[in-house]
Amino acid sequence: MLKAFSTAATGMSAQELMINVTANNLANINTNGFKRSQVDFQDLLYVHLRQAGAEMFSGQASPGGMEVGSGVRAASTVKVFSPGELVNTTRPLDLAITGEGFFQISMPDGTTRYTRDGAFQKGPNGELMTATGYLLDPPITIPTDAVAVTIGKDGSVNVTDPSGTQSVVGSIQLANFPNPSGLSSEGDNLLAQTEASGTAVTGIPGNNGLGLIQGGFLEKSNVQMVTELVNLITAQRAYEVSSRAIRAGDQMLQTAIQTGSF
């Protein structure tokens, strides 16, 4: 009877994680470039009371076995990199990636992070940076006297000076990974490379499977509110049912004690 307590407890713990992940998805429904996470579950070890095919009596094997599971555990949380909706902002430094790839961001400690958030701004000297102040990698600087900025689908950054002359001041490169779901979330809309993600492969947008850059657009979150609300309700009901199993086991144990058969 006590096994039911521990088994149901694993279900409650798993659904608690599911609710936490779903709540984070919903909280970031308006976060630029955010990718929703999903939880993968696995069942735990089984106690085999009788093996399938075991001999029941002379010359007759059992068609099925008898086994009792130990519950469930969360195996992993996986990011889903389906595309988010593209919103037209008309702001030239707002960039969206149509297809595979990530913008590269240079961190103060010299490492590189990756993001799908293309809401870039100009720093005090014209350098392109994130809203947090991290520089785009490779670095690109917009001249302070530029009157117009146009970023092509291939990542080329074109500026127009007061005389009307156009020039290219740099090119944005993208990075991709063999397993993007293996990237580690670091906050600030940034992702970090891990052993599971593989090594970053960089290149010009539109080449080697990398997506194109769309200037004047932002990629919004790929979180679907209806889907997340369904997941939230399902997890809540599963949590309640697991707690009900504990109460049922407690009542049965109490009955056994009262009747003196325990």
Image (spheres, rainbow, N blue to C red):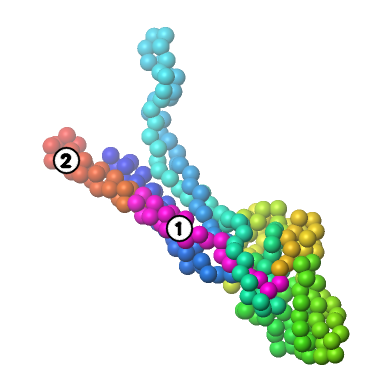
Which structural element holds mark 2?
A: helix
Relative to 186, does residue 201 appear above or below in the rendering?
Answer: above
What residue is drawn where x is 70% and y is 53%? 178
Distance from the alpha carbon under mark 2 to that under mark 1: 43 Å
Q: Is residue 24 visible?
A: no
Q: Is residue 89 left or right of residue 65?
A: right
For label 1, the residue is: 226
Segment tinted magenta in the rendering: 215-238
For label 2, the residue is: 255
- Residue 34 versus residue 219: which sits nearer the camera? 219
Which structural element holds mark 1?
A: helix
Residue type, numbered disc 2? Thr
Task: Please state the horizontal and vertical placement of residue 130, each as a whole percent of the image.
Answer: 65, 77
Residue type, numbered disc 1? Val
Which image quadrant for residue 257?
A: top left
The verdict on residue 234 being magenta is yes
Q: Is residue 163 left or right of residue 64?
A: right
